[in-house]
Image: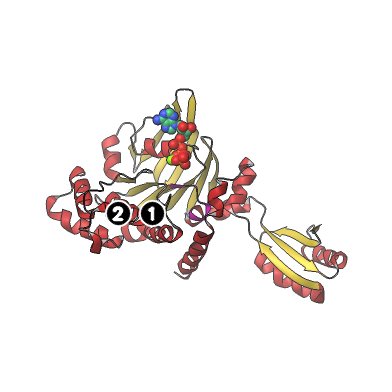
Amino acid sequence: MSIIKVEHLSKKFGAVTAIRDVSIEVEEGTIFGFLGPNGAGKSTTINILCTLLSPTSGKATIAGYDCMKDSSMVRKSIGIVFQDPTLDKELTAYENMMLHAYLYNVKRSEIKDRIHNALRFVDLYERRDDVVKKFSGGMKRRLEVARGLIHRPRILFLDEPTLGLDPQSRANLWDFITDLPRKHNVTVFMTTHYMDEAEVCDRISIIDSGSIIATGTPDELKKTIGGDVIYIKTSDNEKAKVEIEKLFDVDVSEKNGELFLTTLKGDSCIPQIIKTIGDKALSVRLQRPTLNDVFIKMTGKQIRDEEISSTDTFKEDMRAYRRRFDRG
Ligand SMILES: Nc1ncnc2c1ncn2[C@@H]1O[C@H](COP(=O)(O)OP(=O)(O)OP(=O)(O)O)[C@@H](O)[C@H]1O
Ligand SMILES: [Mg+2]
């Protein structure tokens, strides 16, 4: 069942078209990632879904409620972590949570337990009586996630939740975000411009200049690139080329003295290649397409050059995370 349904949504700010004909469906209990560069229209879309902005045209429903007509029911169904932090730094973590619980009419008798549980979930229980100005960026973001859950929403919107955090805090926050569907039965809709975060989402849409340019699972999108590329260094390229072409019935090309071919099942082809060309094999490497490749193919540009290079450490953390995830 689609818990979020967006149909042909557009929003103009005067002469600026922030989003154009955006359609999205998100299934309950999944993590949806909205990936795009600066100014692509991610926050505009989230703000419409959270009933803070009206669209120029189109329709959106959240948990079956119309974002324009049933805004109070939509608001009861969702939690939000805004792109810009909104905590009161002079208050303690507990007091920030309490304010939010009052705003959302949480039953007085339940408030304390709910706050304690939410703070335990994000590992901030021990720091509940500290003022927020003493918190690190990662702790503040985790507190905002906990706060967004206090009224038990079915959906949590997170607008760039990890922006500006160091790699370790990002990976740490990601642990909590990826636990949300399983531990809290919460559907997650998040925006990001980090490829690595998008990789861990169940489904993503890539948005550029207000339009969605691709939607699918990360694997589906990467397959549009045409598969893995295998590079082979050999002692006799001419002979090896003929043998590999015969083996897979594909074209093998040569660049910088290396043979290469594109295939959908890179890792299972490598043993066959080595067996076939035998001693001629000097080295073999596999290059998997990335979401960055998908973005470049679709738009002809990188998402954000400077931040792609700064994600290297984070990539390591994410790889470790994925290994853990794969093991269940
Ligand atoms: N209130 C507003 N008034 C006028 N223009 C706006 C307003 N809000 C957004 N825009 C414009 O709409 C476009 C999309 O902005 P939006 O904030 O949705 O992008 P974004 O994808 O969230 O970007 P970022 O990654 O920087 O947060 C931009 O061109 C922006 O300048
Ligand atoms: Mg934004």
Q: Mark 2 points at which residue?
A: 143
Query: Does residue 55 appear anywhere in the picture?
Result: no
Q: Nearer the viewer, residue 310 or 158?
A: 310
Q: Specify the quadrant that holds the C terminus.
A: bottom left
Q: How far apart are marks 1 and 2 (CA)?
A: 22 Å
Quadrant assignment, res 52:
top left
Q: Quadrant for ligand 2?
A: top left
Residue 33, how many percent across, how many down? Answer: 46, 49
Residue 245, how many percent across, how many down? Answer: 81, 62
Give the secondary structure at mark 1: loop
Image side of residue 61 versus residue 41, left or right: left
The answer to the question of whether label 1 and label 2 lie on touching residues, with beta carbons closer than 8 A, is no
**Is residue 174 in the magenta section?**
no
Image side of residue 219 versus residue 269, left or right: left
Residue 175, how many percent across, how many down? Answer: 40, 61
Magenta stretch, residue numbers: 191-197
Q: Nearer the viewer, residue 283 or 294?
A: 283
Tell me the residue at 51%/35% (across/down).
Answer: 210
Image side of residue 203 versus residue 229, left or right: left
Q: Mark 1 points at which residue?
A: 29
Query: What amino acid type should be assigned to the residue bearing mark 1?
Result: Gly
Going by the picture, which residue comes out furthest to the left?
109
Tell me the residue at 20%/54% (across/down).
Answer: 94
Residue 229, how many percent across, how many down? Answer: 70, 59
Q: Nearer the viewer, residue 69 or 34?
A: 34
Going by the picture, which residue comes out furthest to the bottom?
279
Query: What amino acid type should be assigned to the residue bearing mark 2?
Result: Leu
Looking at the image, is mark 1 or mark 2 earlier in the sequence? Answer: 1
102 in relation to 126, above or below: above
